[in-house]
Image: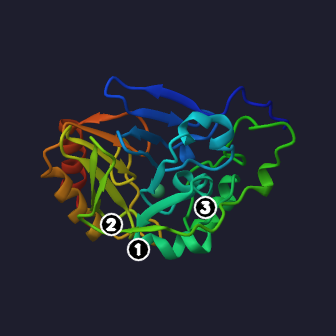
Amino acid sequence: MTLARAHGWFALEERDDGVVRITEPHADKLVRANLWWLRGTDRDLVVDAGLGVASLRRHIPHMFERDPLVVLTHAHLDHVGGAHEFTERAAHKAAEETLAQGVPASLNGPELYRQLGVEPAGENLPDLLIDALPHTGYDPRAYRVQPLTVHRSLQDGDVIDLGGLSLTVLHLPGHTPGCIALFEERTGALFTGDVIYDGHLIDDLPESDPSDYRRSLARLADLDLSIAHPGHGRSISGHRLRERAHTYLSAPFA
Ligand SMILES: [Zn+2]
């Protein structure tokens, strides 16, 4: 199958609150994650970095004008692939080792699951996880995620001040040991990565821990937040987030 070249790889959408959501529409839903670009008066911050299939600097050069800090919510390919393009990277200390080794990565569905150590359990995995090429001559088989050094090691309670915007780090392990969310207290906005979104939550990866996940979601359910900007899909209200958390917490615990 020959894929056509995409017209622009990233889709940008500016919200009323000034937060910019960036997506990769040509990535399969399995690996189609959100990047969130926030602008403080002193500095910009980008939550997560996408797959790294296409260059963020080439496609969105204006995002790099103020040398943004990239904060990685966890060490999965669809969140960190483009992180090598930033001059400063931050992540939870529990994610650093995996990031330094180079996270498991493939654009071939079955191969990706093999690398992640996941059983496809009846799922029909696409051979190719992109439906267009970022540029002519791109070879999806050559796709890798580069080993990443972390410049700013984060822990629960750390505060990242951007000027006019200040984000508190919440360590919320479960999906992976190094999962974090960022909470902006003034607006009540929470950037959740893969801890929670409107869809099936993944707690069965080899590095997942369902009991940690329950504790993390119980903590989120108690948080006074207005909106959640997740790693996948659309933003959800605080009410919807609490509903999702309670659904998970009320399911029988194996
Ligand atoms: Zn993930």
Q: Secondary structure at mark 1?
A: helix
Name the residue tied to disc 3.
113
User: In the shown orientation, is residue 32 left or right of residue 228?
Assistant: right
Q: What's under tag 2, amino acid-wise?
A: Pro
Closer to the chain start, of discs 1 and 3, is 1
Q: Nearer the viewer, residue 41 or 55?
A: 41
Q: Quadrant of residue 148?
A: bottom right
Q: Is residue 120 above or below residue 247?
A: below
- The residue that appears at 45% across and 70% down in the rendered structure is 95
Please say whether residue 123 is visible from this viewpoint. Answer: yes
Tell me the mark number nearer the camera, choosing from 1 and 3: 1
Mark 1 to mark 2 CA distance (whole Å): 9 Å
Q: Are marks 3 and 2 in contact (CB under 8 Å)?
A: no
Q: Are marks 1 and 3 in contact (CB under 8 Å)?
A: no
Q: Is residue 42 above or below residue 103?
A: above
Some atom of ligand 1 lies within 8 Å of the CB belonging to the residue at label 1: no
Binning the other alpha carbons within 10 Å of mark 2 as few (below 14), some (14 to 19) or many (20 upward) gives many
Name the residue tied to disc 2.
173
Q: Are marks 1 and 2 in contact (CB under 8 Å)?
A: yes
Q: Secondary structure at mark 3?
A: helix
Closer to the chain start, of discs 1 and 2, is 1
Closer to the chain start, of discs 3 and 2, is 3
- The residue that appears at 56% across and 42% down in the rendered structure is 64
Name the residue tied to disc 1.
94
